[in-house]
């Protein structure tokens, strides 16, 4: 029998021992191949989604590739550690260290080739159903199955090269190990003297400081704190697992009335050793899980934005231009004709908006006429505005601004035209999108509006006003094909000039929503695939570590059973042993993510006036359910191995 045949038979005759590593590699290849099928599809690559989503997919595939390499390397290291006694026997029988390294390389390449080919085949078999799901989510007319060489070649290249490099790197860790050390297995360290009290306190302090910074972050401090917080939270988490937990367990041991009760001494002692020997693994699992939580949370935030888009943008289309805009008549006529050609119901309102300076704040204000506002409010079905001469009303640009303005009373004079106004009310609904009106916008009576006859103080450098045409279209989702030529002129001007030079601005809510919805849907699919790999990796890290120490744990439980440990007591001990390994890193990741999204919610509320609490809570709840199910699955397999 040749050496190659020996490696081949060693893999297939003991495939049960290789199954965990094979399945982890297989699933990574499967997800990566589906991702490349989607990324290289002509409808996605050259379709209506544009360059930004595709660029995001390329960035995500690079992250997925790098993480997959790291995941396979860690899985292989854990797998090799679990085979220490097998290697010891081979070395004892006369196998050279160089031959042992060669055996590892060959076995890894066999598993890598099988997992790569099977992952691609299963991915291609599933791809038609996958593309059907993508088509429905993106709302595309068609997304047919296609056969192209790019996904196959890219996936094979990425993973076969990964297995080649990783197998040779892993083989380096095997040589120069004594047979007696391999037979003894991993050494346990005296955990009671293995931590630094200073680092333990520092770890907890850094995490608390990071949470505090997240609570007080604002738009002005966002850039600085986003550079500081990741550093403090990473360092604090590392010290938390290497020192803080051991410090806390040591404090718990000193409470004799608790420590000496029932089997708690055994549980705490075992947890102390486990935490000390697996600190780096828990650190990795925490941040892999945090990445998964953050990915789902960001997708939830995008979902909240799309669901609240109609509230943020109440109008179907908006055309805004200078008073002397030469394109106004042509563009407005074109928009009306296109709406009528598509037989869409609409209500157009023309505004003449004037700029003046408030004596109360010395800031510019945009002034709207009562009649124009009522024309738009009638199409909304909102209450009308009734103002006497000398009275004004605020126009709120967000829900928070509306709450603040309810208690504001302003006695002011529009300085250029010497018009006196008293403003003590705010209109109780959002009338215009935030991007259209300024933060200082008011409504005045028709009589006061006529009295505003002087130009703005900074004219001609700043226009004294503008014309605004609003189109209230009930079915605004259908407007995405209207005003495309105007939108193209705006896009071209943005690309060719450093500053915006056109005398008009056009915004089509239906078109913007179609891009946002398509981008969100595409990123959701990408995110789900990435999160699936992250979740698999986080769970597999714990599983491989359990598998590595399985022989020693089985001996311990066999010894306990000989001295009278019942099956029920064994289940309780196993549960107490596994719970911290599963839920401590994931729980800490959940807390990290919760504080991160508290910060994100504060910023989104200020900038876009949207709430993501509901979506994030639902997403995190699903995560918790998945982790609980996964825990009981691993617990079931662990108990089965212990009882063998």
Image (spheres, rainbow, N blue to C red):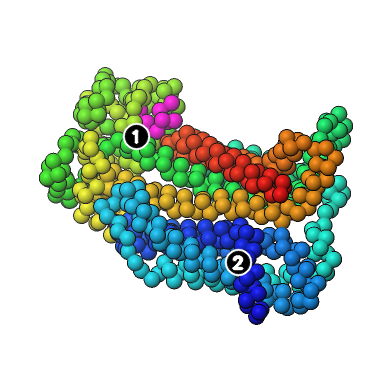
The residue that mark 1 highlights is: 311
The residue that mark 2 highlights is: 12
Viewer-closest of 234 and 184: 184
The stretch of residues the image draws in magenta is 394-403
Residue at x-position 67% and y-position 46%: 640
Viewer-closest of 135 and 419: 135
Residue at x-position 69% and y-position 71%: 171
Q: Label 2: few (<14), some or many (≥20) within 10 Å? A: some
Q: Is residue 599 visible?
A: no
Q: Is residue 400 magenta?
A: yes
The image quarter in which residue 188 lies: bottom right
Q: Is residue 310 visible?
A: yes
Q: State the SS at label 1.
A: helix
Q: State the SS at label 2.
A: helix
Kindly check if marks 2 and 1 are in contact, taking CB atoms under 8 A apart as contact: no
> Which percent across, then down, holds residue 218?
54, 40
Q: Is residue 395 magenta?
A: yes
| Figure quadrant of the N terminus | bottom right
């Amino acid at each position: 029998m040749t050496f190659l045949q020996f490696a081949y038979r060693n893999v297939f005759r003991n495939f049960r021992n290789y199954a965990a590593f094979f399945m982890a590699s297989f699933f990574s290849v499967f997800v990566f191949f589906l991702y490349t099928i989607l990324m290289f599809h002509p409808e996605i690559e050259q379709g209506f989604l544009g360059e930004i989503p595709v660029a995001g997919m390329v960035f995500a595939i690079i992250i997925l590739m790098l993480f997959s390499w790291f995941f396979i390397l860690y899985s292989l290291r854990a797998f090799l550690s679990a085979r220490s006694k097998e290697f010891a026997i081979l070395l004892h029988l006369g196998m050279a260290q160089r031959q042992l390294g060669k055996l590892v390389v060959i076995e890894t390449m066999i598993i890598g080739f099988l997992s790569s080919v099977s992952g691609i085949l299963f991915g291609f078999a599933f791809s038609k159903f996958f593309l059907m799901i993508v088509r429905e989510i993106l709302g595309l007319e068609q997304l047919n199955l296609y056969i192209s060489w790019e996904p196959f070649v890219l996936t094979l290249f990425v993973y076969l090269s990964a297995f080649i490099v990783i197998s040779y790197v892993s083989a380096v860790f095997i040589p120069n190990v004594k047979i007696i050390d391999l037979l003894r297995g991993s050494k346990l360290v005296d955990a009671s003297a293995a931590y630094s009290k200073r680092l333990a306190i520092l770890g907890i302090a850094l995490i608390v400081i990071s949470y505090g910074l997240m609570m007080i972050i604002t738009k002005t401090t966002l850039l600085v704190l986003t550079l500081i917080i990741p550093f403090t939270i990473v360092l604090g988490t590392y010290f938390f697992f290497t020192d803080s937990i051991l410090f806390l367990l040591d404090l718990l041991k000193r409470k004799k009335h608790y420590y000496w009760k029932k089997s708690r001494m055994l549980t705490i002692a075992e947890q102390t050793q486990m935490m000390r020997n697996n600190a780096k693994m828990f650190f990795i699992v925490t941040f892999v899980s945090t990445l998964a939580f953050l990915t789902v949370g960001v997708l939830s935030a995008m979902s909240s934005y799309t669901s609240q888009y109609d509230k943020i943008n109440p109008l179907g289309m908006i055309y805004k231009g200078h008073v002397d805009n030469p394109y106004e008549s042509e563009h407005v006529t074109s928009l009306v004709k296109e709406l009528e050609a598509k037989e869409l119901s609409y209500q157009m309102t023309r505004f003449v908006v004037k700029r003046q300076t408030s004596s109360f704040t010395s800031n510019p204000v945009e002034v709207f006429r009562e009649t124009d506002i009522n024309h738009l409010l009638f199409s909304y079905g909102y209450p009308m505005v009734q103002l006497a001469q000398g009275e004004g009303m605020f126009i709120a640009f967000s829900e928070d601004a509306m709450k603040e303005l309810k208690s504001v009373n302003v006695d002011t004079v529009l300085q250029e035209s010497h018009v006196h106004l008293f403003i003590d009310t705010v209109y109780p609904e959002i009338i215009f999108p935030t991007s259209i009106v300024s933060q200082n916008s008011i409504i005045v009576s028709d009589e006061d509006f006529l009295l505003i006859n002087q130009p703005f103080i900074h004219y001609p450098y700043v226009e004294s006003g503008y014309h605004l045409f609003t189109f209230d279209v009930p079915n605004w989702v259908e407007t995405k094909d209207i005003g495309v030529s105007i939108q193209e002129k705006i896009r071209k001007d943005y690309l060719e000039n450093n500053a915006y030079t056109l005398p008009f601005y056009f915004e089509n809510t239906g078109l913007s929503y179609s891009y946002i919805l398509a981008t969100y849907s595409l990123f959701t699919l990408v995110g789900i695939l990435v999160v699936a790999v992250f979740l698999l990796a986080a769970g597999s890290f714990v599983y491989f570590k359990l598998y590595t120490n399985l022989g020693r744990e089985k001996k311990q439980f066999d010894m306990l059973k000989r001295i009278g440990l019942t099956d029920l007591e064994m289940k309780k001990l196993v549960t107490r042993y596994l719970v911290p390994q599963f839920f401590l890193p994931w729980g800490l990741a959940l807390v990290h993510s919760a504080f991160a999204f508290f910060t994100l919610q504060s910023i989104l509320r200020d900038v876009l006036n949207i709430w993501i609490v509901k979506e994030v809570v639902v997403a995190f709840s699903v995560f918790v359910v998945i982790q609980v199910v996964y825990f009981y699955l691993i617990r079931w397999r662990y108990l089965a191995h212990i009882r063998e």
